[in-house]
Image (cartoon, rainbow, N blue to C red):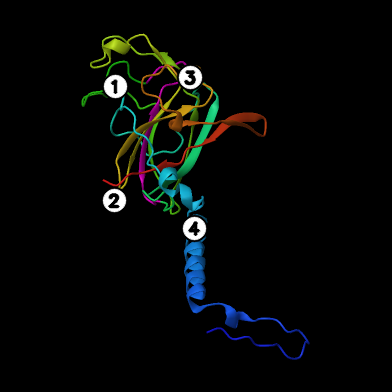
Amino acid sequence: RFRRRRHHGNGEGDMNDDLIPNASRTISRRTLLRRTATVMAGGLLGFPATGIAQQCLPTSSDILGPFYRAGAPARAKLTDPGEVGEVLVVSGTVYGPDCRTPLPGALLDVWQADHAGHYDIKEPANLTDRTQFRLRGRLLTDAQGHYEIETITPGRYPVPPGLPGLEQYAGRTRPAHVHFIVMHPLYGPLTTQLYFRGDPYLSQDPWAKPSLAIALESQATGDAKRLVGKFNIVLARP
C-alpha cells in the first residue's frame, strides 16, 4: 500500500518517491545498468556499440605474387642511394584480432616494383638467386606495435606472360602496390598488398580490394616533397 507524506520546512505538500513501487525501482536500475554497460563498451572500443561486430575485421589477404624473395635485408628504408622516384612514407600499427591491442615485435616483410614497374628480378625467385636486393626490407614493430617504412611510389606494370597460374591475366596492367607479409608469434601470418586510392586500374584488377587502398597526402620537408599514408593492419586468429 502506498503512503503519502508531506515535506516540511519548505511549505510544499508534494508526493515523494515513496509512491514509486519497488518493482519499478528495480526495473529502472536494471535498465540503467544495461544502458551504462552498452555506452561504456562502445566508448572503450572507440566506435558505437551497435557496430562492434561489423567494425572489427582482419586485414584482407592478397596474392603473394611471383616476385617474392626470402632473406631481404633488415631495414625500414627500402631505397638505396640514387633510387629514382617520388618519396613515399607509409606508417601504421599492427593490431591483434580485437582491432585495439597493438602487437610489438611483429615482423613485416615488404617489397615492391620501382618507379617504372620493374622488380629487382625478372623471373620468379628461386633458392639460388643471388641478385642484389632492391626495394625490399624486413622490420619489426616497436613497443607500441608501430612501424614506418620509407620507399618510393611504385610504378604500374602489365602482368608478364608465361607466369605459372597467371597466364590468363598476361598483359593486364596492375595498379601501383606494395607487398606485405606480416608475422607474429600468436597471430597470422598475413600476406597482403597495399594500394592507393584514385588509381584508375584498381577497379579492373582481379586481386585489389577497396579496403586495402589508402589515401596519400603530399607533405613538404624543407625543399623536398614526399607522399605520406597510413596503413593499419589487423591480424586474424590462427
Relative horizontal placement of residue 219, taking residue 116 as reference (left or right): right
Q: Disc 2 marks which residue?
A: 186
Q: CA distance from mark 2 to mark 3?
A: 35 Å
**Residue 109 at what x, y percent from top left?**
35, 36
Q: Secondary structure at mark 3?
A: loop
Separation (CA) of disc 1 from disc 3: 18 Å
Residue at disc 1, secondary structure: loop
Residue matched to label 1: 66
Q: Distance of mark 2 from mark 1, alpha carbons?
A: 27 Å
Residue 207 appears in which quarter of the rendering? top left
SS at circle 2: loop
Q: CA distance from mark 4 to mark 2?
A: 23 Å
> What span is in magenta?
103-119
**Residue tagged 4:** 44
Is label 1 or label 3 in front?
1
Q: Is residue 222 visible?
A: yes
Q: Residue at x 34, y 25 (%)?
A: 132
Mark pair 3, 4: CA separation: 42 Å
Tell me which label, 3 or 4, sits earlier in the chain: 4
Q: CA distance from mark 4 to mark 1?
A: 42 Å
The mark found on residue 115 in the picture is 3
Q: Is residue 27 left or right of residue 66?
A: right
- Residue depth check, mark 3 versus mark 4: number of the one nearer the observer: 4
Q: Residues within 10 Å of mark 4 (few under 14, many from 20)?
A: few
Tell whether position 61 is magenta.
Answer: no
What is the quadrant of residue 87 in the picture?
Answer: top right
**Looking at numbered disc 4 in the image, what kind of residue is underneath it?**
Leu
